[in-house]
Image (tube, coloured by chain):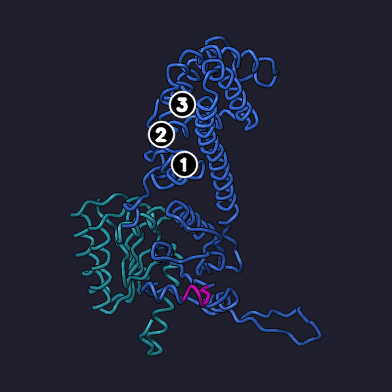
Chain colours: A blue, B cyan
Amino acid sequence: MSQSRMQLPEKFLTVAEMMNIGDQELARRKEFLEFRPEDEERLHKLAPLSESYAEAVIEAFYTHLLKFEEMKVFFPDNATLERVKAKQKQYFIRLTKGNYNLDYVEERLKIGTIHEQIDLPVKSYLGMYCFYLREAWKHIFEAGKKEPDEVMDTFFSLMKLVFLDISLTIDTYIDSRERTIKSLQQEAIRELSTPVLPFREGMLLLPIIGQIDSQRARQLTEHLLESIRINRAKVIVIDITGVATVDSRVANHLVQTVEAARLMGAEVVISGISPEIALTMVTLGIDLGPVHTVGDLQDGIEHAEQLLGYRVKKFAETGKTDKGDRV
Amino acid sequence: MKVPILKQGNFLIASIQGALTDTDLTSLQENLVCSVRDNRSKGVIIDVTVLDVMDSFAARTLRSISIMTRLMGANLVIVGIQPDVAFTMVQLGLKLDGTMTSLDLEDGIAMLKAADQNQERGDYGR
C-alpha cells in the first residue's frame, strides 16, 4: 500500500546529499577556483606554521568581534566563548590538513548550517574570513620573507580554499532559507485549502487546492466524513481543478475518500478533471473505478443536483423569484 | 451479545448494541435470514452506529448477509458507519462492495422505501 512507500526522513541524509553536492560537483567547484593538487601540497607544507599562529589569530579575532554589541549576544557566557574558540581553532587547523573531499565538504556544510540556525548574519561570517585571511597573510609573509613567490602562491592556495568554504557556507544559507520558505508555503496551502462547504441541503462542496500527500489526504478525508455526518450530506462534489498533478498515489487517495464517503451513505462526484489530467491518467493507466467524474465544477454541481433530485430553473428576464424554483 | 431484530412494517431492523464476537455475527446472520423468511420482509436494516471497530470478518459477514437477503428478495442497508470506522475500513480495503450504506436509520428507511417503490414499478435496477 502507499503508506509503506514513505520517503526517507531527511535526517538520514547528509547535508551534502540534501544539497545535491557530490564528487562531481565538488570537482567542478575546485576547477572553477583552480584549486589543484599543487595547492593541496602547499597547504600541507603550511600546516606546522598555521598550527603555530592559529591561537593568536583566534584571540585577535574574538577581541575584534566582541567590540561589536550585536555580536555579544552570541556569547552569553565565558564557557560558550571558550567552546566556540576551541571549535574555531579546529576549523582553522583543518584548513591545512589536506583531504579536501566530500567529508571535508560535509564538515563545512554542517558548520554553515549551525551558523545559519543561530541566525549569524552572512556579513559577520564573511567578515570573519576576511579577518582570518589578513591575519594569516601577516604570519605567512613574516615566515617566508626570503621567498616572496612561494609566499604568494601559498597564500593564494589558502585563499582558494577559503573561497571554497565560503561558497559552501553561503549555499547552506540559501538552501535553508529556501527550505524554510517552502515549508511555510506548504503549511499555508494546507491551512487554506481544505474547506468543506455546504452548498445545498444534502450537498457539500470540497475544493482541493495544491498538492495531495498521504497526510493531507487523510486529514481531508477525516474532515469530509465528519462534515457528512454533521450536514447529513448525500452528495459531495470534490473539485480538483487546483490540483496540479494527478498520479497514481493521488488517484488512490481519491478512490479511498470516495469509498469511505459511500460507506457513510454519500455519493461523490469528482469535478475539475482537465484534458491534461485526463490524458495523464489514461497514459499512466490510472482507473478511478466507479467514481462519477465530470469536467468542471459547473458540471459537477449540475450532476450533484440531479442526483439529489433538484431541478434548477431560470426565471424569465423579469426576475420574478418569489416562487419556489426547485422541485 | 445477542442482536435484537425488530420488525417494522415490511422491514426488519437489526440494531447492534455493542461489540460483537465472531459467533455473535454468525448467529446474527442466521437469525436475520430466518426472520426474512418468516416475516416475508422486503427490506433489512443493520444499524452499526455503536461499533467503533469493523474487522474483516464483520465486514465479510455483513456483505454475505446482504447477498443472502437479496437472494431472498429483500434489500439490505447498513446504517450508521462512523467517520473513523469508514476511514479505517477503506484503508484496510474493506469496501462492502454491492451493499447499500446509509448515514443513519432515518436515511436507511428512506432508501429502502425508495428501492421498494422502484421495484413495485417494475424497475429492478438500482
Mark 3 on the same chain as mark 2:
yes
Image position of A193 (left or right of A16): right
Direction bottom: furthest residue = B122
Specify start and end residues of the magenta stretch as a single range.
A273-278
Give how far apart the Cα atoms at labels 1 and 3 are: 15 Å
**Secondary structure of the residue carrying numbered label 2:** loop
Q: Main secondary structure of the magenta part?
A: helix
Q: Are marks 1 and 3 in contact (CB under 8 Å)?
A: no
Please say if A96 is above or below B112.
Answer: above
Who's the residue at 36% across and 46% down the image?
Answer: A8
Tag 1's secondary structure? helix
Q: Chain of mark 1?
A: A
A62 or A10, nearer to the observer: A62
Quadrant where the image shows the C terminus of chain A: bottom right
Q: How far across and how far down the image is residue A27, in percent?
A: 42, 44
Work out how far the residue at label 3 is from the one at label 2, CA to CA, in angstroms: 9 Å
Residue at the limit of the structure toward the front, as seen here: A146
Q: Classify the position of the N terminus of chain A by image quarter.
A: bottom left
Q: Position of residue A253 (x, y in %)?
A: 41, 61
Mark before the other along the chain sequence, 1 or 2: 1
At label 1, the amino acid type is Lys
For disc 2, the marked residue is A100
- Residue at 52% x, 10% y is A79
